[in-house]
Amino acid sequence: MTEQTYQLISIILYMAAMLFIGWYAFKRTSNLTDYMLGGRSLGPAVTALSAGASDMSGWLLMGLPGAIYLSGLGEAWLAIGLTIGAYLNWLLVAPRLRVYTQVSNNSITIPSFLENRLKDTSRLLRVASGIIILVFFTFYVSSGMVAGGKFFHSSFGLEYHTGLLIVSAVVIAYTLFGGFLAVSYTDFVQGLIMFLALILVPSVGVFITGGFTETVESIRQVDPALFSLVSGVSVLGVISSLAWGLGYFGQPHIIVRFMAIKSVKETKSARRIGISWMLLSLIGAIATALVGVAYFQQNDAVLADRETVFIVLGQIFFHPLIAGIMLAAVLAAVMSTISSQLIVTSSALVEDLYKAVFKSDASDRQYVFLGRAAVLFVSFVALVLAWPNKESVLKLVSFAWAGFGGAFGPVILLSLYWRKITAQGALSGMVTGAITVGVWGSFKVLSDTLYEIVPGFIVCLIVTYIVSLATYRKNADIEREYNETIYLLKKER
């Protein structure tokens, strides 16, 4: 068999495993809470790795190693910012959100939680946040599909549209039938594959390049500045990179995992597992890039596309069957993010827009059917957007991250930690935060100077605070739920 045949076998086995998990989750899904939130039954390991896998996407295995390979450790500030942000998200948001969403009318989405938490009878807050999720995530899903199509084209020479349809069909199938459980279980497996691949490649690579000392020396011969965290980096550049961590507080596809974990007690275990996975994976990605620099220097070779350093090294270092697993790791990173965003977008359509606008009292079975129909609808729109294979779609990823962080981040934090936040304040902050991100990001001179999440987050925080103070009226139900949440947190801990 040829090398490509071995690799294709690995990919087919991986795809089959994802579909099997989707079928398994389908058998365990009976109502809307199951479909949208897995019945709040996730264990700490599944919660942690599914949150990490859905977060990292192809950036972890391609974007970050490519940036480090080209520019050195100066590009690692983004990884540092993300690690700090993820840790604070687990520490500050996870326990309170898990309890508060259950106390506040058993909310199963972020928009429904904000409406229930702030007793907004106008439905404006729920509809506005549902629309923001729907719009941003449709483009987000589309960018993942583009990445999947390009993966099959670059790895196996398949035509872009063929690869696009293969990735889309598998992800849609297990998300459509298995819902949140399928997404979480597949993300867990995908997270394990990504982790093992990122540990194996640099570990074997250091051995092949002559050991630690020889590897370091080879890198220094290329450019000693590759080991510098500050070389060629401006102060605003560091701030912009670290600011990516702010985005975590407002990412619906990540914080929805906190709502689904079995209990508050397990958030501590999940935090330890999740941050350990993230740290080791990021170190592995950085080490992969540096080992790549040493390997190509020693062999007097040139890497055509820096973002493929992980894939190329995997194919050089391992048997084609194992190299296929390395390729599956890249595909896992892409697919885990697509599926997570699909299920959150589906919940926004059904739970936050359809229910809110039509005030429907359909049965659980009908709602699950509508949830699956929503997955199909969003997938179709995303597929249409991905079909032309335009690079501009991929650029929306960083913009969408900033949009969610700027629009939702401060509102989520204040809703969990401040009694006096109001529906008017949250809606005003959310809208002004999203607009600020949109305006700032549309001017290249501004976004190149400072990442748009910084002004968006600050504006949202200030506006939410000021408008809430101006509109605050004491509400007995809000006070009762806030106090009950604090009580249950202390009790469960």
Image (cartoon, rainbow, N blue to C red):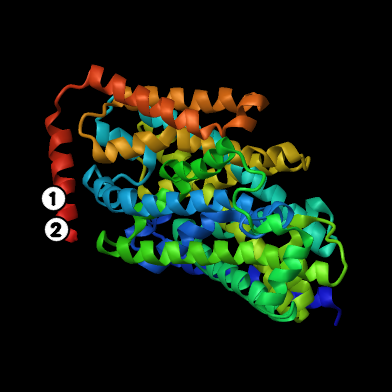
Whether pointer 2 and pointer 1 mark residues with C-beta atoms closer than 8 Å, the reply is yes
Residues packed near mark 1 inside 10 Å, few (<14), some (14 to 19) or many (20 plus)? few
List the residue tagged with mark 1. 487
Residue 481 appears in the rendering: yes
Q: Which residue is drawn at 64% across and 23% down?
A: 443
Quadrant that contains the N terminus: bottom right
| Horizontal arrangement in the rendering, residue 7 relative to residue 144 (left or right) | right
| Horizontal arrangement in the rendering, residue 197 relative to residue 209 (left or right) | left
What kind of element bears circle 2? helix
Residues packed near mark 2 inside 10 Å, few (<14), some (14 to 19) or many (20 plus)? few
| Horizontal arrangement in the rendering, residue 453 relative to residue 490 (left or right) | right
Q: Residue at x 25, y 63 (%)?
A: 265
Q: Distance between the residues labelled 2 and 1?
A: 6 Å
What kind of element bears circle 1? helix
Query: Which of 389/38 is in front?
Result: 389
Which quadrant of the view contains residue 194? bottom right
Q: Where is residue 425 in the image (x, y as percent from the top left)?
A: 32, 24
Q: Residue at x 52, y 67 (%)?
A: 280
Query: Which of 224/430 is in front?
Result: 224
Q: Which residue is drawn at 57% across and 58% down?
A: 336
List the residue tagged with mark 2. 491
Q: Where is residue 289 in the image (x, y as percent from the top left)?
A: 69, 62
